Amino acid sequence: MNLMSVAEVTFWHYWVFLLLQEIQNPVERLRTKYNDHDNEDKLSDLHDENEDKLSDLPDCVLLHILSFLNTKYAVQTCILSKRWKNIWKCLPSLIIGYSHFKDLKGFEYFIHGFFGTRDCSTALQVLDFSEECYVGYQSHLEWIVRYAFTHNVKRVRIDVRKVQHLQSYFFSCDTLTSLHICVAFRQRTLFQNSLNFPALTYFFLGSFDFGVDDDGRVEPFSAFKRLNSLILQNCRTLDKQNLCISSATLTNLTIDYGSWALGYCKFELYTPNLCTFVYKGIPPVQQLCGSKSNLSSVKHATIVVISLFQSAKTSLIIYNWLVELANIESLTINSTTLQVLYGMFGWFRFLLRQLFS
């Protein structure tokens, strides 16, 4: 059980306890048992201990606490207290998934009720949608995303099993600053180059394919003028084209090919302000940058090789990368990377002299 689940269960049990207190107050039970004045102080102390202090918190604090819960549990928690019964209508987040409902009808009923009675003047700042088991969820996804995009959403996280391509409703949102969208491991989804997210600063993509632009290049991120952090997980290009990652604002880049059986994508970096670079997989290219760019700005690098396959070739590639990363202040590698480098012992000794000279 993860930390969020523990918090949800604890919060739920606490309010069940408060409900039972309203039904049968332990102070009243003790008062019937002890009638003498000597026990008045004890009764007063017990009453103070059982006081509902959470309900005295301002609505903004309660909403902040509830916004971290799954939305179904947040609504259930609110209806246990007269003080809280309408607070959920102003929740700034929607955290929902099919697994929290017995069937699809229950999910649809809840979403209809949530959107139908929610205070529309409150911005929906966070959307977290996950699909684990049901098919035919595309209409639900469209409905939920449309609502979020028209209510000034800032952070969106979507984990689904299959999306063949992004629909038009997903193309534009002026307020979106963080987008995490991941498709199941074996599915592939074509990335749309016409996405319009002018405020986007954080972008996570999982299991996407990138197509060629009109100019014959694969350069999907140049339109995001404020992009700060980019994470690519098991993403590829069509027709074995090089992926050009071009951004003047990008400072953190992670490329994860941990599931290397799917193959790799060759890439070129044009990121003059990149500070942190993380790569996981088997390095596919001799050089990180194109001929008109360099990585002198990178200060922190992490290289995690996941297999000893073609270790001789890989060791030369890693050496070339480290030459390009000459200005780094910290380097993190795993044991497999160390084995690959040690396999070419002569190169490894030369590398150590270069790094510590």
Image: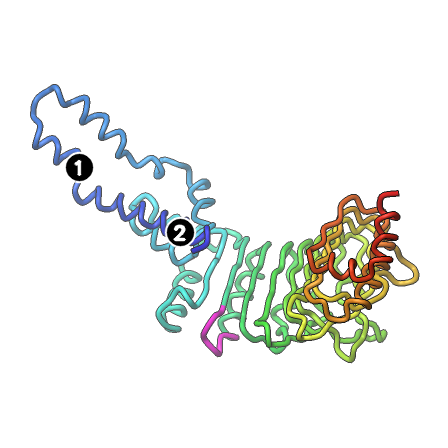
* Residue marked by disc 2: 8
Lower sequence index among marks 2 and 1? 2
* Residue marked by disc 1: 26
Residue 198 sits in quarter: bottom right
Q: How many residues crowd mark 2 within 10 Å: few (<14), some (14–19), many (20+)?
A: some
- Position in image of residue 245 (x %, y %): 79, 62
Residue at horizontal 70 percent and vertical 59 percent from the top: 304
The amino acid type found where label 1 is placed reads: Pro
Residue at horizontal 75 percent and vertical 54 percent from the top: 277
Which residue occupies the extreme right position in the image? Answer: 291
Main SS, magenta region, reads loop
Residue at horizontal 42 percent and vertical 54 percent from the top: 5
Q: Is residue 310 above or below residue 149?
A: below
Along the viewing direction, whichever of 277 and 79 lies nearer the viewer? 277
- Position in image of residue 203 (x %, y %): 67, 59
Question: Could you tell whether 234 is left or right of 348 in the image?
Answer: left
The amino acid type found where label 2 is placed reads: Glu
Question: Could you tell whether 67 is left or right of 192 in the image?
Answer: left
- Position in image of residue 354 (x %, y %): 88, 48
Which residue occupies the extreme top position in the image? Answer: 38
Residue 219 visible, this angle: no
Question: Which region shows up in magenta?
Answer: 131-138
- Position in image of residue 91 (x %, y %): 45, 51
Estimate the spatial distance between the alpha carbons at disc 2 and disc 1, rounded to whole Å.
26 Å
Residue at horizontal 80 percent and vertical 74 percent from the top: 213
Q: Secondary structure at mark 1?
A: helix
Queried whether the magenta region covers residue 203, the answer comes back as no
Q: Is residue 294 above or below residue 99?
A: above
Q: Quadrant of the N terminus?
A: bottom left
Q: Secondary structure at mark 2?
A: helix
Residue 81 visible, this angle: yes
Along the viewing direction, whichever of 75 and 288 lies nearer the viewer? 288
